[in-house]
Amino acid sequence: MPDAVPCNHCGTPFTPYSDRGTVQRFCSDRCRYAARVDTRFTPTGTTLTATCVECGQDFTYESATKPQTICSNRCARTRKAARARVRRARQTSNRQPSQPW
Ligand SMILES: [Zn+2]
Ligand SMILES: [Zn+2]
């Protein structure tokens, strides 16, 4: 028996159904639509708080078109470098078994 969860928009408890791994987060299409409109129209210049995905620190930023997940340019660079390293490592390990000798 699945548990009732509060709707992400209005907070009304409802029983979510899951559809191929996607779990329902809103009690109705109306709330889903309302929540989408809300996020789309966050006025630019609103100060928002988020947690940096790189260093884990909370930071504030002025809202723009996309939600920010990195606190600073420094963290952005660190993350980009780490990703490039992973990509390089994967390429090297893929290449090795196909060596002709
Ligand atoms: Zn709702
Ligand atoms: Zn950071």
Image (cartoon, grey):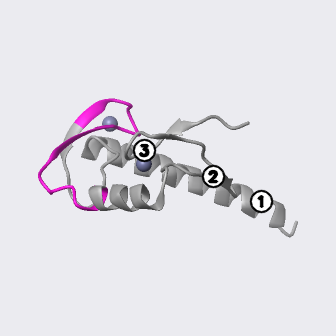
Q: At which x and y percent is residue 47?
A: 16, 43
* 58 is within the stretch colored magenta: yes
The kind of secondary structure element at disc 1 is helix
Q: At which x and y percent is residue 17?
A: 64, 50
The kind of secondary structure element at disc 3 is loop
Write the residue at 49% across / 50% down.
27
Report the residue marked by disc 1. Answer: 96
Of the numbered discs in the image, which one, if any, rests on residue 8?
Answer: 3
Total marks shown come to 3
Callout 1 crowding tier (Cα within 10 Å): few <14, some 14–19, many ≥20: few
Q: At which x and y percent is residue 6?
A: 48, 38
Q: Amino acid at mark 1?
A: Gln
Q: Single out the residue that lies furthest toward the right.
A: 101
Q: Quadrant of the N terminus?
A: top right
* 57 is within the stretch colored magenta: yes
Q: Is residue 83 above or below residue 48?
A: below
Callout 3 crowding tier (Cα within 10 Å): few <14, some 14–19, many ≥20: some
Contact between marks 3 and 1 (CB within 8 A): the answer is no
Q: Nearer the viewer, residue 72 or 50?
A: 50
Q: Amino acid at mark 2?
A: Ala
Q: CA distance from mark 1 to mark 2?
A: 11 Å
Write the residue at 42% across / 51% down.
80
Q: Which residues are magenta?
A: 39-59
Image quarter for ligand 2 equals top left
Q: Is residue 39 above or below residue 74?
A: below
Report the residue marked by disc 2. Answer: 89
